[in-house]
Image (cartoon, rainbow, N blue to C red):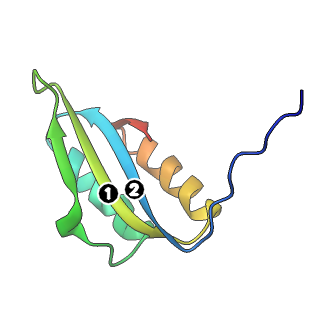
């Protein structure tokens, strides 16, 4: 059985990123600041925010114009380093 390579992404492209974390003060501002650092000028009006059923967690979906895998790796690393984010999809 041959192992398939994952499909290659052609950059630049529109790339939605879902960020999950505890719903606490400062999370949204911290996440937006990281995105602004790595994808300056992204459309903040397009951010989708959803609370969990009990309001404990918050999911933010942010779409950026991704320029390459290095940008995405750095974005993931810095989001996780905020202390607010528990998962990036």
- In the image, residue 23 sits, relative to residue 12, either above or below, namely above
Q: Give 74 or 15, whichever is nearer the viewer.
A: 15
Contact flag, marks 2 and 1 (Cβ < 8 Å): yes
Residue at 31% over, 62% down: 33
Query: How far, Cα to Cα, is label 2 from label 1?
Result: 6 Å
Labelled disc at residue 16: 2
Image coordinates for residue 78, horizontal then vertical, percent: 47, 51
Labelled disc at residue 48: none
Residue at 50% over, 49% down: 76
- In the image, residue 23 sits, relative to residue 8, either above or below, namely above
Any part of residue 81 in sight: no
Callout count = 2
Image coordinates for residue 6, horizontal then vertical, percent: 70, 46
Say which label, 2 or 1, has the lower sequence index: 2
Image coordinates for residue 72, horizontal then vertical, percent: 54, 57
- In the image, residue 12 sits, relative to residue 32, either above or below, namely below
19 to the left or right of 80? left
Q: Give 78 or 1, whichever is nearer the viewer.
A: 1
Any part of residue 1 in sight: yes
Secondary structure under tag 1 reads strand
- In the image, residue 28 sits, relative to residue 11, either above or below, namely above
Secondary structure under tag 2 reads strand
Q: Give 61 or 74, whichever is nearer the viewer.
A: 61
Please identify the quadrant where the C terminus is shown. Answer: top left
Q: Quadrant of residue 80?
A: top left
Image coordinates for residue 9, horizontal then vertical, percent: 62, 61
Mark 2 is surrounded, within 10 Å at the Cα level, by few (under 14), some (14 to 19) or many (20 or more) other residues, namely some
**View extreme (top): residue:** 54
Which residue lies under the disc numbered 1? 62
**View extreme (front): residue:** 1
């Amino acid at each position: 059985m041959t192992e398939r390579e994952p499909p290659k992404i052609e950059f630049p492209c529109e790339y939605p990123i879902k960020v999950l974390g505890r719903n606490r003060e400062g999370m949204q501002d911290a996440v937006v600041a990281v995105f602004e650092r790595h994808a300056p000028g992204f459309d903040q009006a397009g951010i989708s925010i959803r609370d969990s059923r009990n309001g404990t967690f918050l999911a933010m979906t942010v779409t950026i114009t991704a320029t390459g895998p290095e940008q995405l790796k750095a974005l993931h690393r810095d989001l996780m380093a905020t202390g607010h984010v528990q998962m990036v999809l």
